[in-house]
């Protein structure tokens, strides 16, 4: 799994940037309608799922954890497609999709971090990312009747923190790649 992340660290950067952009847009346009939120979430989820699936496809054969990456990628793509094919869904339905996606994504991230704890120092960042996803999903489930603006801000905050955490993980992995290349040259 670590080898997969080492070769595809830049996909984590793209996922982090997509999350940050999504979060910033949620704050820049707080009065957006549910329709725009559906499209924005669908685009983010679809892009995130494609990048995650690409990471799994680029992984060397036999790499542990590929199934988890494939499942995360397909889950993101499915959430994105559902929002595009059913744009008239209600805000509560969208929140249920977002919440389920966040909780499942968070659980898988925690599982991956635990699997990598022997190979990757500071795996706590990935665990924190997973916990943040689960907490966000639970909050959305617990507050479905909150005002639309509150939900948009909650989604924006989540996306920004999640993007920052993904970028942090990508930088750490890139550092390991650089260290490995330097060690190889010196040997």
Image: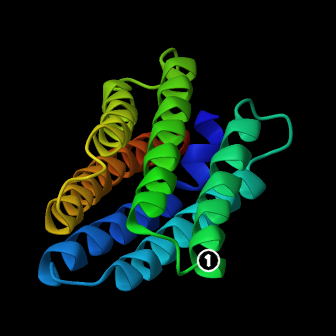
In this view of the protein, which residue sits in the foreground, 104 or 54?
104
Secondary structure at numbered mark 1: loop
Give the labeled residue for mark 1.
Answer: 86
* Quadrant of the rendering where the N terminus is positioned: top right
* Image position of 79 with respect to 56: above or below: below
Residue 18 percent across, percent down from the top left: 39, 71
* Quadrant of the rendering where the C terminus is positioned: top right
Residue 106 percent across, percent down from the top left: 45, 36
Quadrant in the picture for residue 62: top right
Q: Residue at x 46, y 38 (%)?
A: 103
User: Crowdedness of circle 1 by 10 Å Cα count: few (<14), some, many (20+)?
Assistant: few
Residue 134 percent across, percent down from the top left: 38, 34
In the current view of this chain or complex, which residue is farthest to the top? 118
Asked if residue 187 can be seen in this view, the reply is no
Quadrant in the picture for residue 120: top left
Image-based side of 167 in relation to 151, left or right: right
In this view of the protein, which residue sits in the foreground, 178 or 75?
75
Q: Residue at x 35, y 64 (%)?
A: 19
Image-based side of 58 in relation to 89, left or right: right
* Image position of 84 with respect to 122: above or below: below
In this view of the protein, which residue sits in the foreground, 57 or 176?
57
Image-based side of 152 in relation to 27, left or right: right
Q: Residue at x 40, y 34 (%)?
A: 130
Residue 126 percent across, percent down from the top left: 39, 34
């Amino acid at each position: 799994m670590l080898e997969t992340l080492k070769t595809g660290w830049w996909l984590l950067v793209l996922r982090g940037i997509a999350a940050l952009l999504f979060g910033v847009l949620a704050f820049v346009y707080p009065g957006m309608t549910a329709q725009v939120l559906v499209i924005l979430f669908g685009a983010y989820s679809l892009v995130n799922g494609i990048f995650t699936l690409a990471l799994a496809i680029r992984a060397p054969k036999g790499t542990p954890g590929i199934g988890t990456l494939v499942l995360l990628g397909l889950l993101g793509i499915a959430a994105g497609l559902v929002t595009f094919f059913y744009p008239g869904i209600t805000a509560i339905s969208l929140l249920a999709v977002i919440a389920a996606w966040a909780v499942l994504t968070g659980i898988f991230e925690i599982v991956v971090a635990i699997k990598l704890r022997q190979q990757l120092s500071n795996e706590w960042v990935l665990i924190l990312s997973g916990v943040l996803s689960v907490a966000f999903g639970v909050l959305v489930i617990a507050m479905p009747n909150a005002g639309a603006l509150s939900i948009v801000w909650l989604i924006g905050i989540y996306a920004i923190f999640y993007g920052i955490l993904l970028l942090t993980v990508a930088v750490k992995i890139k550092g390991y790649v650089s260290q490995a290349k330097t060690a190889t040259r010196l040997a």
